[in-house]
Image: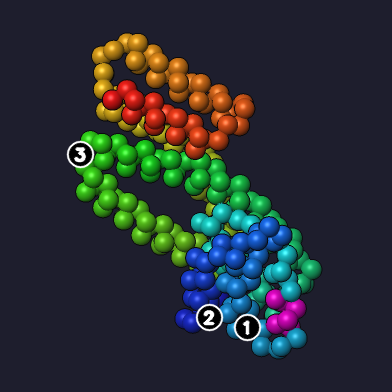
Amino acid sequence: MYRIPHTPFLLVFLRTYLIGAAFNMRGLQNVGFIHAMDPGLAAIHQNPRELRKARNRYVRHYNCHPYWTPLVAGMLLHTEMEISKGRMSPETFATIKDTAVNTLSALGDSVFGGTLLVTWALAMGTMIISGYAGFALASSIVLFLALQLFKLGIFIAGFRFGLAALFRLRRWDLINWGERLKIVNTFLLLLFLVICLPEKHAPSLWGLAIVGIILAAWLAARLHIPRALLALVATIAVLLLV
């Protein structure tokens, strides 16, 4: 177990917020990632030759969900500590990095991008059209701060436990929780429509709304129509009906 020094490793965490600042079509987020990791690498590898080798390990392709990048950074700092102490071979680095990135990329897109952000948007939208805009703003601020604490927490966990942090993460059962939240999102969408639609007792209007939702789900799942485009069409339709 390692204690995190106050300066270089905290700087690594703060730099993960800039991970997409130098996005490129060849390595995607690799420039931003090596920029984030550099203070930690310089603190771990005092020998200039070993530091150069460590930096070269990060010039490859990198692309991960930004909410999970602090965990990847912490895990790889742990790996670099093990390499510097001779307890791990540098050849194992690529395996650990690929395992972490592939696992967390899929988890981030499913749980955060496809579920939690949708839950937040539907819940805040429902509050706003119900006349609770102030409460929606306060809730968003609290959730934003909670996200920052989450990112700091997983960074520390990755630094302390390395690849073993993924096995601890497995206990959270995030995939199944994501499926449960999608059911919650369905009810939130229904509540939003109940409040938003002008004619709450018009069977034809409700029938049209239900058919529209089913059609939109089919178009997104089968024909891969962009969800943003479907949302835009739905918004225009609601505005025309008001």
Residue that extends furthest to the front in the rendered view of this protein:
240
Residue stretch in magenta = 50-55
Residue 19 appearing in the image: no
**Quarter of the image where one finds residue 218:** top right
Judge depth for marks 3 and 1 and give the one in front: 3
Quick one: quadrant of the N terminus? bottom right
Q: Nearer the viewer, residue 94 or 215?
A: 215
Upstream in sequence: badge 2 or badge 1? 2
Indicate left or right for 202 with 219 as reference: left
- Looking at the picture, which amino acid does disc 1 mark? Ala
Residue 64 percent across, percent down from the top left: 60, 56
Identify the residue position indicated by label 2 in the image. Answer: 8
Q: CA distance from mark 2 to mark 1?
A: 8 Å
Q: CA distance from mark 3 to mark 2?
A: 46 Å
Judge depth for marks 3 and 2 and give the one in front: 3
Q: Nearer the viewer, residue 52 or 165?
A: 52
Is label 2 in contact with label 1 (beta carbons under 8 Å)?
A: yes
Q: Secondary structure at mark 1?
A: helix
Is label 3 in contact with label 1 (beta carbons under 8 Å)?
A: no
Q: Secondary structure at mark 3?
A: loop
Identify the residue position indicated by label 1 in the image. Answer: 42
The label shown at residue 131 is 3
- Looking at the picture, which amino acid does disc 2 mark? Pro
Up/down of 4 relative to 162, above or below = below
Residue 45 appearing in the image: yes
